[in-house]
Amino acid sequence: MTEQIQALTDESKKLSRLIGEAKKQGLDTADELIARKKAVQASIAELKAKMASEQPDQVSVKQPTGSEAAPSAPAVTKAKRQPSELERLQALIPPVYPEPVELTEAAQSSGRYRCDVSQTPPAGWDDFVRQHPRATLYHESVWLKTVVDTMGHEIAYVACYLESAAEEQLQAVLPMIRQKSRLFGDIWTSIPLVNYGGALALDKNAEKHVLKAAADFARSSGARHLEVRGYHKQPTGWPERTDKVNMWLPLPADSETLWKGFSSKVRSQIRKGQQNEYESRIGGMELLDDYYRVFSENMRDLGTPVYGKSFFAGILTNFGSSARLIVIYCKGEPASCGFLVAQETGAVKLLEIPWASTRQAFNSLNMNMVMYWEILSHAADTGFDVFDFGRSSKDAGTYRFKKQWGAMPVQLYWHYALFQADELPAINNNNPKFKLLVAIWQRLPLCFANRLGPAIVKYIP
């Protein structure tokens, strides 16, 4: 099996070179080569997971000799151990850096890094992002443009190159968005509103350079701090927060297997909700009004300002089938909703739910459980590898809710370059500074909350 992995690794490296050559020459074969490389990477991940979990099929037990020998004693057979859920999850998490990229002799002899910061994506940005194993949809320029266009923020694309006299090669990228207000301060975040961000780099050295360039630029702009989000520990030595995790559920090949894996308690709660008169719809812009009705009402009840409807409309418009809405109707009323984002990170096909809500009037009818079952069964039956329940604080109520479905924590690391403060920021509903504002917000009429919310929430990272 080791030989198979090495052969596939060699093939992947060869494909990387062919992809680079095809893109330089503008050949149509680049997309086909990228697809082949993803298939090879998926095979490597599968073999590594299998290799980690396999044990010998039989364990021979040495029999006693002489007069104590038992001539009829059978060999002890030990069943092959199946990979645990945790091992399955770890096999799905993409590597921090791609396989080593072969550099030209000129680039190797130079070894000089240069970092640029611009307000528009530099040439090759999206191609670099899409080929990186840790890339997310949120690193792509179309997502960043959507945020800027709907919220009016300042943006910076930080790019790191390895340069020589003959050429320069993109080695790392880091997008960041500035949010500046009197209430929350002046901050840069990579990336706000979502859980994933930070640098995508070919190696640790390039990552260090692009992070330093981002921090230098943020400091020179007069910001209080730079926050970099991701799910690996970055090589900066900056202060970090590790109180948040993302909850990932590895999915089986079909919804029937998924159902059998749930506890009897979870199945009972789903059935209780299904006893009500309900309808599930998955779609796009045609569901936005009903989605927003549920989402905005729940956000007001939680004391949290709501995103503007134009923000969600912009995502639906720009991402097509990669962004979908689900709305659960109970007795003809929109009761529960979720915003779904489909993406591939490395060779893993992942479905994420960044935003979800249920109206309080329908909590006792278990519409939330029905919605998650509808999403999970859809994800399993349509070939997704992982369902990402989103971010939770460790051992919080939302953490326990997601864990009951079988989801497991993936550690989040949020690093901070502090410029005008000594303590890590705490912008959340549990901060005593905001408790009074939360209580006031919960009492606002929904029409006022929806009108005021977008102007406030766009400054909350």
Image (cartoon, grey):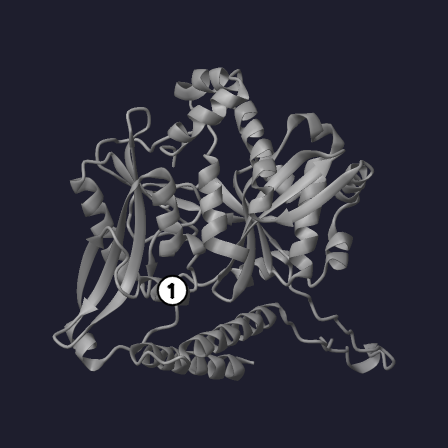
Measured as percent of width and height from the top left, residue 209 is found at 23, 57
Q: Is residue 154 left or right of residue 397?
A: left
Q: The C terminus is located in which quarter? A: top left
Q: Is residue 22 left or right of residue 251?
A: left
Q: Nearer the viewer, residue 354 or 311?
A: 311
Residue in the picture at 19% in, 46% down:
217
Residue in the picture at 71% in, 45% down:
280
Residue in the picture at 53% in, 63% down:
348
Q: Nearer the viewer, residue 190 or 421?
A: 190
Residue in the picture at 32% in, 39% down:
152
Q: Nearer the viewer, residue 6 or 159?
A: 159
246 w.r.t. 74: above or below: above
75 w.r.t. 416: above or below: below
* Observer able to see residue 231: yes
Q: The N terminus is located in which quarter? A: bottom right
Measured as percent of width and height from the top left, residue 149 is found at 35, 44
* Observer able to see residue 429: no
Q: Residue under circle 1?
A: 97
Q: Residue furthest right?
A: 72
140 w.r.t. 43: above or below: above
The amino acid at mark 1 is Tyr
Q: Residues within 10 Å of mark 1 (few under 14, many from 20)?
A: some
Measured as percent of width and height from the top left, residue 252 is found at 68, 61
Q: Is residue 364 left or right of residue 203?
A: right
Measured as percent of width and height from the top left, residue 388 is found at 56, 50
Please tell me in which quadrant of the rendered image residue 250 appears. bottom right
Q: Label 1: state its secondary structure.
A: loop
Please tell me in which quadrant of the rendered image residue 178 appears. top left
Q: Nearer the viewer, residue 414 or 349?
A: 349
